[in-house]
Amino acid sequence: MIHRPLDSNFCVRSPTPSPPECHQQFPINELPIELLGEIFAHAICPEDEPRFTTYERGVKEYNFREQTILSISHTCNYWRDVALLIPELWSHLHIVGPNEGCLRLVRLFLQRSGNAPTLDLRLHQIFRADTWPDEFVKREVHFTKQILALWFAHARRWRSIDLHLLVDGSLDFDLVQTLTPASMRHVEAARLQFSWFTYENALQDAMWNIIATSPVLTEARWKYRSIPYPPSFPGPYNLITPRPLSLPYARLAKLQLRNVMVDDFLAFLPQCTRVQWIDLAIVGVIDYSMNKLTVPTLQTVCVHGASYGISVLLDHLITPNLKRLEVGPMDVNSSCISRLLIRSQCSLEHLALPEDLSEETLLSMFQLPCMASVKRLAVGYRITQKLLLALTLPDEGQAAKPVLPLLQDILIRRFSAPDGVLLAMVQSRFREDGSGLKVLDVRVDEAGNNFADVEGLFGLVLRGLTMYWLGQGHTIFNDRIEVFD
């Protein structure tokens, strides 16, 4: 989905309100309406992505924009008047588990979005017909149909559309046929994931065919639908239905794919001449007879799923402009990560590593030339004293070459080291002027007496370090410390 602040030329409905005298004492209320609206927009749609993806960091995607704008509009009468005057603030709708309350929310937002030129819409069902009582499923389908009918009536305003439909029959074919190329001219991003029934496959293909006519489409996300092989088939794989053939692959900058077969992905990747970002959930590979592929435009690679599929993919890519690499859990051939970085000779800035890497693999990876530019690091492997000493910057005047000299943000998911070692590493990198380590996120894996670490790090928090510490005995959340038994 697209997250962005308001356009610089957004319109404010008239008349323009003025803050009451009792609120004029607050400096924020002295700002022009347009600037205050921009602040509201950034609060609703933050530009920055989560620093690490869900499978690496455990951070949920920001899904509560509707609650944010409603909270803003209920802060005071003046803020409510300002929020109601700016249609763009009401143009983002994310519905999870459609129900009667969601339907009322949709009607409210469509009314208040007024003449906003574009809408960002997302609807995810949560009840599957094979695991939930029939009454729950039928109720969700009922409200899904009503919400989609309202959204399709505003199709000419879509900027992004995300539909995750788990139940067959949630979307009527007649509704899809109301879409026209003229109504799709603003669509920049689309994600369609329907149930695997044959009728739903045809419905999804019909939607992709019409969405593909958008002249500004740059982001596509889909899940390959798997169909079980006949029992006589000798193999562990499922039959994966074809990808959308009508998409303008040469224009796409972002691809998020689920249930990916590596050989199929590498077969059409050369068509994506502008792709900059890929997020893949890999299920396997059938044909290993593939040549290495250079993708000069690719800057972000996020992969997880089947370990052998990940290793095959990384061993067949050359990414000279790679800036961000995130690799999910893998239990085989983890050296493929180092081989990709060596082969690509890129200037990496963001690296998230799985927990299966060995200490020796990590230490050797830290020495690679491309690691000298890394600013953000997430490590799933248990951080030991040896690794912390390797990350500790040498004192000035020492001839030792520093490891990861530009590191600003580090996530340690499994920490186990003697008390004081982590503090020494952080102290060697922290700079009060903000030029060194800025963010530290630590998860203590086992009970220990890290009192010197906690006390010293909290002192650095007071001097400007952003820190999160979760573990036995202590919890630090940025500017406060909690101690418990």
Image: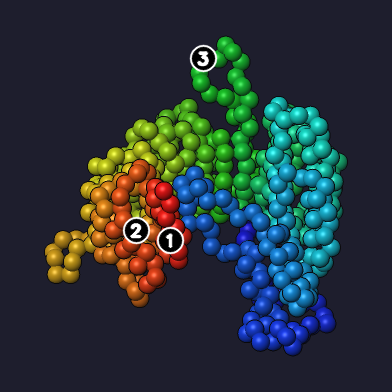
Image coords of residue 93 (percent x, y): 73, 56
> Mark number for residue 454?
2
Q: Which residue is mark 3?
A: 234
Residue drawn at 51 percent across, 32 percent down: 283
Q: Is residue 433 found left or right of 129 in the rendered image?
A: left
In the rendered image, the vertical position of residue 267 relative to residue 52, given as above or below: above
**73 or 372: nearer the eye?**
73
Identify the image quadrant of the N terminus.
bottom right
Cβ atoms at labels 3 and 2 below 8 Å apart = no
Q: CA distance from mark 2 to mark 1?
A: 9 Å
In the rendered image, the vertical position of residue 459 relative to residue 445, given as above or below: below
Q: CA distance from mark 3 to mark 2?
A: 56 Å
Three-letter amino acid code at disc 1? Ile
| Image depth: mark 3 or mark 2 in front | 2
Residue drawn at 53 percent across, 58 percent down: 49
Mark 2 or mark 1: whose residue is earlier in sequence: 2
Look at the numbered disc 1 and give the secondary structure of its residue: strand
| Image depth: mark 1 or mark 3 in front | 1
> Mark number for residue 481?
1
In the rendered image, the vertical position of residue 69 relative to residue 61, given as above or below: below
Three-letter amino acid code at disc 3? Pro
Mark 1 or mark 3: whose residue is earlier in sequence: 3
Three-letter amino acid code at disc 2? Val
Image coords of residue 68 (percent x, y): 68, 63
From where the camera sits, is residue 202 visible?
no
